[in-house]
Image (cartoon, coloured by chain):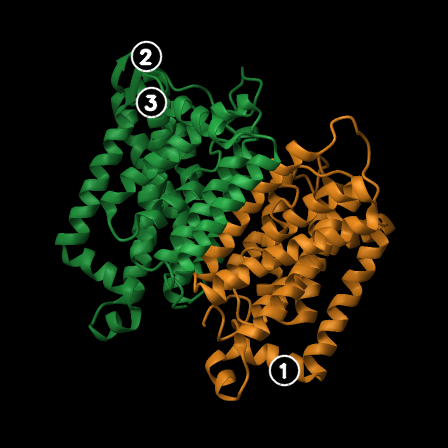
């Protein structure tokens, strides 16, 4: 029982962090398919820097890498006017390619064993603090109101004297911060970097965001639910469940299927921010 | 001006990365070209890589003209390849071959159906649903091919091999040349699509929806229906691509059937812009890159490099062409 709880928390940690990253970005109006790539980049850079300069700098470098990716995303969407989805997908491809390239080229072949990292507990604490901080920020401060305004109706926000593209700049930096933490956690959790180690977590986080109706609390709960599903998958692998041997692929598919059903509008009404993807 | 700055930045970043990794860009370019275009065998290999990219690229292109971004082509390709392998194994000979192609088309279209329906009638973004369905498609085919339909005498997770009589014949097979008739099918489909889009009312309506959905609605076009059909056809073409991959090249379906053809085909379609005929040279470009990338592995260049190039190419082409595409949600 305790085992399941611990496993659920550790599975949900990167999802919560990535989903909060997605929250900041999408609430400000930038569709973020690129969470996956930002996490992957952060994981790779933090692994490389942790080895050479120690764990603290490793995490900071990972965050910096994700922030840089986010800034590229901001430039692409707000300055070059590239479609949000296309730029996000291309960031994912660039990350997949660049991390594969960097890690095979720059990692030290003589070194083996775990990478020294900050304890996973640090990230788990972040994953608890982040949603609380975001709820307070969005609910209680003027900045939070601006964030939601620029994502809900950029045109009206502009008429009210706000500058949506600047708000989005800050939002995307926050996205980078959270993605950086999520990526670094993956390395801290497993002790290694492997190719494509995010394994779709960025998309699952996006799914949680949609299921949670772009609200912090519900999104975090969806992440916990997905974490619980993955822990069930690990616990029940190969065992019989009521006479059925459910394949692990079934469990991995559940979050994705749930999202498709949610988008079909079968799980309550859709709450997509109205200004998502608009300039 | 800004576009030029971006292109320069991408090229500089790319070359800088090569140099930082201790690879001479000139040597890399030479290896890439000789590995993909240097000999008849290399050219045949590039054409083989081009075929799935051409078909999947046409699928993405078709949806894109209707303003839909079908990222799900990877899943449709997988399901098409899988279904055609099953049918070709069950029904032998040329009849089986024909049925297998049909099965591929149907499987691909069915896999695109939820995304099309949700986009057309529920207004849920097709990008999200197709990404999710891709993951489900990978899990589903992985499971089926590892368990229920796995060949008994094979070590890996794969179906049995389809006998030669049930496969697509080669168009040209005199070693070192080897070109499959699958490529010809792709070219014919491309020509047909270009004609259909230019000359048929339905083709015009499709593109009208893509250009401005609300204007199309006012002009009396049933936008939801067009979107639904566009997604189905796009998925069907993706499924056909998978079927041709099975029937012309692989001869079976296995785990890891598509090394990312679905993704590269997004680049193909984006680069092709508004002209279906341009899908051919663009898929050739990506085919050459993909084949050349394999020979770069020998130089010690990681395979991720081709992915990186694809990403940069998509970003650059999108600044020039797709500044507003597929975003009128």
Chain B drawn in what color?
A: green
Chain where mark 3 sits? B
* Residue lying furthest left: B199
Q: Say if residue A264 shows up in the picture.
A: no
Instruction: Return the residue nearer the eye: A47 or A75.
Output: A75
Q: How far apart are labels 1 and 3 at the CA level?
A: 58 Å
| Residue at 49% from the left image edge and 75% from the top image edge | A274
- The residue tagged 2 is B176
Q: Position of residue A3 (x, y in %)?
A: 85, 48
Rendered image: mark on residue B43: 3
Q: Residues within 10 Å of mark 1 (few under 14, many from 20)?
A: few
Instruction: Return the residue nearer the eye: B265 or B30.
Output: B30
Chain where mark 1 sits? A
Chain A drawn in what color?
A: orange
Q: Is residue A240 above or below residue A262?
A: above
* Residue lying furthest top: B175
Q: Position of residue B49 (x, y in %)?
A: 38, 29
Give the mark nearer the N terminus: 2 vs 3. 3
| Residue at 30% from the left image edge and 58% from the top image edge | B66
Q: Is residue A36 above or below residue B218?
A: above
Rendered image: mark on residue B57: none
Mark 1 secondary-structure assignment: helix
Q: Are marks 2 and 3 in contact (CB under 8 Å)?
A: no
Q: Residue B122 is drawn in which quadrant?
A: bottom left
Q: Say if residue A52 shows up in the picture.
A: yes
Chain where mark 2 sits? B
Q: Is residue B242 above or below residue B91?
A: below
């Amino acid at each position: 029982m305790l085992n399941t709880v611990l496993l659920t928390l550790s599975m949900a940690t990167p999802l919560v962090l990535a989903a909060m990253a997605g929250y900041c970005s999408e609430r400000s109006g930038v569709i973020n398919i690129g969470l996956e790539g930002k996490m992957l980049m952060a994981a790779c850079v933090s692994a490389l820097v942790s080895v050479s300069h120690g764990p603290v700098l490793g995490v900071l470098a990972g965050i910096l890498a994700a922030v840089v990716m986010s800034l590229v995303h901001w430039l692409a969407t707000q300055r070059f006017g590239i479609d949000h989805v296309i730029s996000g997908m291309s960031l994912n491809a660039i990350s997949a390619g660049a991390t594969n390239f960097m890690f095979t080229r720059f990692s030290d072949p003589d070194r083996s064993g775990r990478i020294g990292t900050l304890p996973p507990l640090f990230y788990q604490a972040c994953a608890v603090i982040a949603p609380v901080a975001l709820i307070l920020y969005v609910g209680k401060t003027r900045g939070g109101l601006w964030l939601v305004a620029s994502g809900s109706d950029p045109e009206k926000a502009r008429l009210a004297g706000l500058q949506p593209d600047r708000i989005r700049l800050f939002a995307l930096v926050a996205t980078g911060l959270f993605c950086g933490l999520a990526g670094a956690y993956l390395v801290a959790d497993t002790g290694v970097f492997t190719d494509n180690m995010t394994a779709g977590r960025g998309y699952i986080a996006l799914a949680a965001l949609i299921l949670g109706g772009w609200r912090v609390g519900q999104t975090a709960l969806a992440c916990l639910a997905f974490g619980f599903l993955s822990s069930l998958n690990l616990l029940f692998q190969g065992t019989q469940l009521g006479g059925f041997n459910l394949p692990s692929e079934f469990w991995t598919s559940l979050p994705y299927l749930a999202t498709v059903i949610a988008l079909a509008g079968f799980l309550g009404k859709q709450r997509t921010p109205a200004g998502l993807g608009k300039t | 001006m800004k576009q030029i700055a971006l292109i320069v930045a991408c090229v500089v970043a790319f070359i800088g990365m090569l140099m930082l990794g201790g690879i001479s860009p000139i040597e890399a370019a030479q290896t890439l070209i000789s590995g993909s275009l240097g000999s008849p065998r290399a050219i045949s290999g590039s054409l083989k890589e081009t075929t799935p990219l051409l078909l999947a690229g046409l699928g993405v292109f078709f949806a894109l003209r209707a303003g839909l971004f079908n990222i799900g082509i990877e899943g449709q390709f997988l399901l098409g390849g899988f279904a055609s392998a099953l049918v070709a194994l069950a029904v032998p000979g040329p009849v089986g071959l024909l049925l297998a192609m049909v099965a591929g088309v149907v499987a691909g279209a069915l896999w695109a159906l939820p995304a099309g329906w949700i986009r057309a009638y529920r207004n849920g973004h097709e990008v999200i649903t197709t990404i999710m369905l891709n993951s489900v498609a990978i899990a589903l085919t992985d499971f089926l091919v590892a368990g229920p339909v796995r060949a008994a005498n094979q070590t890996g997770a794969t179906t049995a091999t389809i006998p030669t009589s049930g496969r697509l014949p080669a168009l040209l097979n005199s070693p070192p040349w080897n070109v499959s008739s699958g490529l010809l099918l792709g070219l014919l489909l491309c020509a047909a699509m270009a004609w259909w889009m230019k000359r048929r009312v339905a083709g015009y309506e499709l593109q009208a929806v893509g250009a401005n959905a609300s204007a199309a609605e006012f002009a009396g076009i049933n936008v939801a229906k067009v979107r639904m059909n566009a997604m189905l056809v796009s998925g069907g073409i993706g499924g056909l691509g998978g079927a041709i991959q099975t029937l012309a090249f692989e001869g079976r379906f296995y785990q890891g059937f598509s090394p990312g053809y679905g993704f590269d085909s997004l680049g193909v379609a984006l680069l092709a812009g508004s002209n279906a005929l341009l899908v051919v040279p663009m898929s050739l470009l990506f085919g050459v890159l993909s084949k050349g990338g394999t020979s770069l592995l020998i130089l010690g260049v990681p395979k991720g490099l081709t992915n990186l190039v694809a990403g940069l190419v998509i970003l650059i082409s999108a600044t020039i062409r797709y500044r507003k595409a597929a975003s009128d949600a």
